[in-house]
Amino acid sequence: MRHLWLTAQADISESLRSRWFLVYSTVFGGIIALLFAFGLTESRIMGFVGLSRLLITYIQLSMAILPIFILITTVRSVAGDRDAGVFEYLLSLPVSLSAWFWGKMVGRFSVVFLPIFLAMAGAILWGLIQGMEIPWRLFFYYTAFLFSLSWCFLGIGMLLSTLARSPDVAQGSAFLLWLFLLLFLDLILLGVLIQEQAPLEAIVAIALSNPLQLFRTASMLLFDPQLVLLGPSAHLILDTFGETLYLLWAIFYPLLLGTVSGAIGYLLFRRGDQL
């Protein structure tokens, strides 16, 4: 465990000095600042106003930006260190492969989750100072969703990084996966299934296996309990899960997916050629 935490601290220190972390933190902090500057807290959508309106917009923007940031930066972890010859030094040190791999994952999770959480917490703090009504339920659920989504794509990124033999291949694979989850799974695959008149249950199950789609619908459920925007599929989702169970599924399924992906990546990493 000591080596794991030391590896995590080393990865955190390295990330804090890198340019991508500066850009990453500026993006999410800038989103909150711009939403306040443009007076979004004064607008209204479906009865939501103030910080509730701001958090709804922030979570939708995070869904599109967060996964690609995590994937692109994480996939260089294993592939980049292998390409730079880091493992030649690693194998000569008294650090186990498991401590290095999971320490890398824990350290990277810290630097990708904290900026998005601190940006949202900063919005809550500013709302308290301004005397706004604080939507604590939205804040806690959105924190859990972002935590889960960050861990999910971090695990997937570590798996891709283990499979790829070079940083360029790893980054290309990460971008294609993000594009597939964001566009093709919703627009093309589901469109084909609908044209072929596949069972509604199968279509919804495939859609909800996509962590981005699950994140989107769960965040919608918090301000649209009837999921009117989803149309007929909302009835199947609510009848099968119910509101509370679906929100819990949206939190724990991505956590499980990220953990399994990370575990598979570690097994492949341990059995593979580190040089």
Image: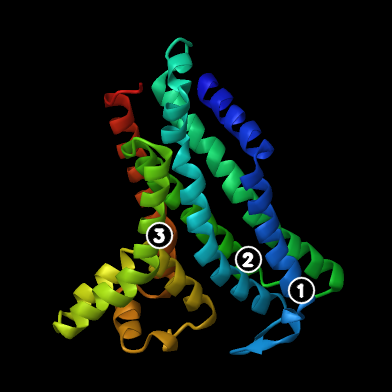
Residue at 28% from the left image edge and 26% from the top image edge? 272
Q: Mark 3 points at which residue?
A: 178
Q: Mark 1 points at which residue?
A: 36
Specify whether 239 is left or right of 106: left
Q: Earlier in the sequence, mark 3 or mark 2?
A: 2
Which numbered tag is attached to residue 139?
Answer: 2
Mark 3 secondary-structure assignment: helix
Across and down, in percent, residue 219 comes to 50, 72
Q: Distance between the residues labelled 3 and 2?
A: 26 Å
Residue toward you, 155 or 143: 155
The secondary element bearing badge 2 is classed as helix
Q: Which of 230 and 247 is in front in this view?
A: 230
Estimate the spatial distance between the alpha carbons at disc 2 and disc 1, rounded to whole Å: 17 Å
Q: Along the horizontal axis of the image, is 129 left or right of 137?
A: right
Q: Residue at x 54, y 71 (%)?
A: 60
Q: Name the secondary structure under disc 1.
A: helix
Image coordinates of residue 140 in percent, x first then y, are 60, 62
Q: Residue at x 65, y 32 (%)?
A: 13
* Applied colour scheme: rainbow
